Image (spheres, helix red, strand yellow):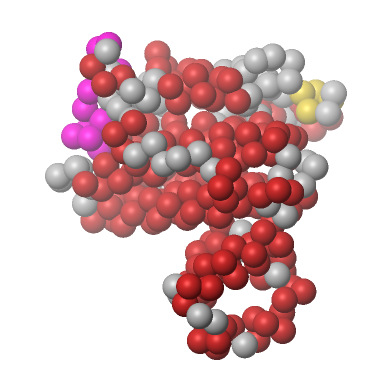
Amino acid sequence: MNILKIITEIEKVDPEVYERLDQRRQMFKHFAGFGKKLAVAAVPLAMGSMLQKAYGQSSGLSAQIREVLNFALRLEYLETYFYQLGLEAPGLLTGQNRSDINLIYIDEQNHVKFLRSVLGADAIPDPTVNAFDYTGAKGGARPALLPNVFSNLGTFLALAQSFEDTGVRAYKGGAPLLISNNTVLEAALNIHSVEARHASHLRTMRRGGPQSEPGDPSSAPQSWPSLNDNGGPAPAITAAIYGAGNPASLYPSEANVVQGGLNVQNISQVSPNEASEAFDEPLDMGTVLAIAANFIK
């Protein structure tokens, strides 16, 4: 077991990991020799103990927090296996596109590892790649929504953007339910920021690079959602991603311009588009799972 590598991987999704382990700083000064001083069989146990103390996990997690983190883990599996199949699809991803998607794939793998490390034995089982059908045909139970998702780069990137935009709203929607554990909340919001950067980069890729003029959200989106983004890249399929959740009073659509009870337009004299673009709106767990269900057999 490479302890430094594990901590490095965790740091990618939680830059504060070393601070969480601050009380064990003295031990970290001798980290290089840590593994050598312990029997090999004892190292995983020691690592588990450290992470439990850092994140207050396992017995310290409430049922609500475990539910939210497992909800996030389901989404991370959905995204991870999507990118894995995209990278495996012959000729779909080449050059810079392949390099960029591979980096996003690694991030998603790290999110899965991180969430599993926090949840410990409470983590849901890995559903495996066979649990998903990214054409939207639910394993042949209905006509495919996106039959060319792994043979057409435009379709692949459009669905990737949809997953990332969903993830951004899902993490924000779950944040209030994690507020009883500041450490877990902060770590989840760190992942939220990574998902937001993925979404922004995929939107840039879809419009052909940073210098291109944004256009139709279905083919050349801005780097962020604007109003309801005209339903997204495939409005008949993706509109729910940008619409209101349930209840709409708590989970408004991305077109929302009221924050903290104040209409942003009235206090800043910006356009409705600009007022909506300044905030990501949360989305409830039920709506997110309904969106994801389109791609689960």
**Residue 242 location (% of width, % of height):** 54, 23
The N terminus lies in quadrant = bottom left
Relative to 168, say whether 191 is above or below: below
Q: Can residue 244 be seen in this view?
A: yes
Q: What stretch is highlighted in magenta?
A: 142-154
Q: Is residue 277 left or right of residue 129?
A: right
- Residue 22 lies, with reference to residue 138, above or below; the image says below
Reply yes or no: does residue 22 show up in magenta. no
Residue at 48% over, 73% down: 41
227 with respect to 74 (left or right): right
Q: Main secondary structure of the magenta part?
A: loop
Q: Look at the image and tell me whether residue 222 can be seen.
A: no
Which quadrant of the structure image shows residue 248?
Answer: top right
The residue at 53%/73% (across/down) is 42
Residue sitting at x 69%, y 39%: 65
| Extreme-left residue of the structure | 90
Whether residue 74 is situated above or below residue 101 in the rendered picture: above
Q: In this view, does 210 lie above or below 78?
A: below
The percent position of residue 91, horizontal first and vertical second, equals 15, 45
